[in-house]
Amino acid sequence: MNEITYIHVLKSLLLVVVAVVVSRCWKVRAEKDMVIGTVRSFVQLLAVGYALKYIFEPDLLILNILVVLVMVTVAGYTASSRIHHLSRPFPLCMIALAVGAMGTLFSLMIINPDWLTARYIIPLGGMIISNSMNATTLSVSRLVSDIRSNRLEIETSLSLGKSWHIATKNYRREATVTGMISILNFMKTVGLVALPGAMTGMILGGAEPLEAVLLQLVVAYMLLAATAVTSVVAVELTVRKFFTTHHQLVIEE
């Protein structure tokens, strides 16, 4: 594989300029986020690149776990910061991520004990946690929005004697699917629309295509499990914040 240099990165910044110009011309008003995201991604990834060198070399399990915990915490904070009209979403997001993402990561011990090294745990953990983070934000945001928008319908169901569990059944289902929509689309089109990240990385690194495919299948199934569990946990924890023990709907203005 040809060496990637800072010159290549600088050249690729032209694509960022294209995105900014498009945003400005079409009045999307996302230029600020694009610039900030570009700068942060450069600084953060560069820092991580140097940090991983010192993490991979000793390859201590306790250090690997610590890195994963930091990733989960940052993901929980990021997910909660994008959820509106819900009090104290951070603990909820952390629980959902801990159950979904961390639980899936533990499956590595069953799938292949040899993967319990920094070289596997951290990259795979990053993919699992980031997808779970997105699933949490999407599912919770969708549920909060649906409950607030359909307040009258829910209260009517409750007044007819239905429990909150039945009154919100459809909203919980739709919110869960929304959290999983990205991975569901991925599973249906993988290999046909695009070559996924793990597979592409291995091929670019010189691995045999079939070996890359087998690893990607494992990653895909882990992502599916992680987003499914995370979405369900996030939705079930969120819906309970809207109802009292007497099945009364409570919406904070």
Image (cartoon, helix red, strand yellow):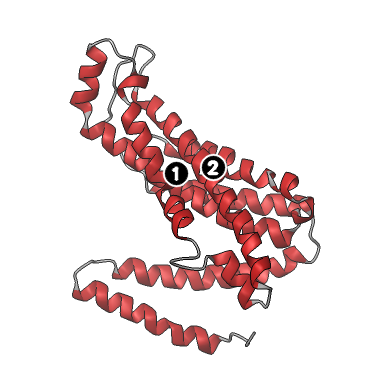
Residue 166: assigned label: none
Residue named by callout 1: 136
> Please, is residue 36 above or below residue 166 in the view?
below
Q: Residues within 10 Å of mark 2 (few under 14, many from 20)?
A: many
- The answer to which of 36 and 231 lies nearer the viewer is 231
- 87 vs 155: above or below: below
Q: Is residue 129 above or below residue 17?
A: above
The amino acid type found where label 1 is placed reads Thr
Q: Residue at image x 54%, y 36%?
A: 95
Residue at coordinates 56% horizontally, 57% vertically from top-left?
127
The image shows residue 8, relative to residue 97, as above or below, that is below
Where residue 97 is drawn, which disc sits there?
2
Question: In this image, 2 relative to 160: left or right?
Answer: right
Q: Classify mark 1: helix, strand or loop.
A: helix
Q: Quadrant of the C terminus?
A: top left
Seen at 34% across and 81% down, the residue is: 17
Looking at this view, is 152 or 32 the one in front?
Answer: 152
Does residue 227 appear anywhere in the picture? Answer: yes
Sequence-wise, the earlier of marks 1 and 2 is: 2
The residue type indicated by label 2 comes to Leu
- Tags 1 and 2 touching, CB below 8 Å: yes
- Quarter of the rendering containing residue 214: bottom right
Cα–Cα gap, marks 1 and 2: 8 Å
Residue 47, image x, y percentages: 60, 70
Residue 86 at least partly seen: no
Q: Residue at x 44, y 60 (%)?
A: 189
Q: Position of residue 119 (x, y in %)?
A: 72, 63
Neighbor class of circle 1 (other Cα within 10 Å; few <14, some 14-19, many 20+) is: many
Q: Position of residue 183 (x, y in %)?
A: 46, 52
120 lies left or right of 79: right
Where is residue 232 shown, x and y percent of the image? 47, 35
Task: Tell me the element at label 2.
Answer: helix
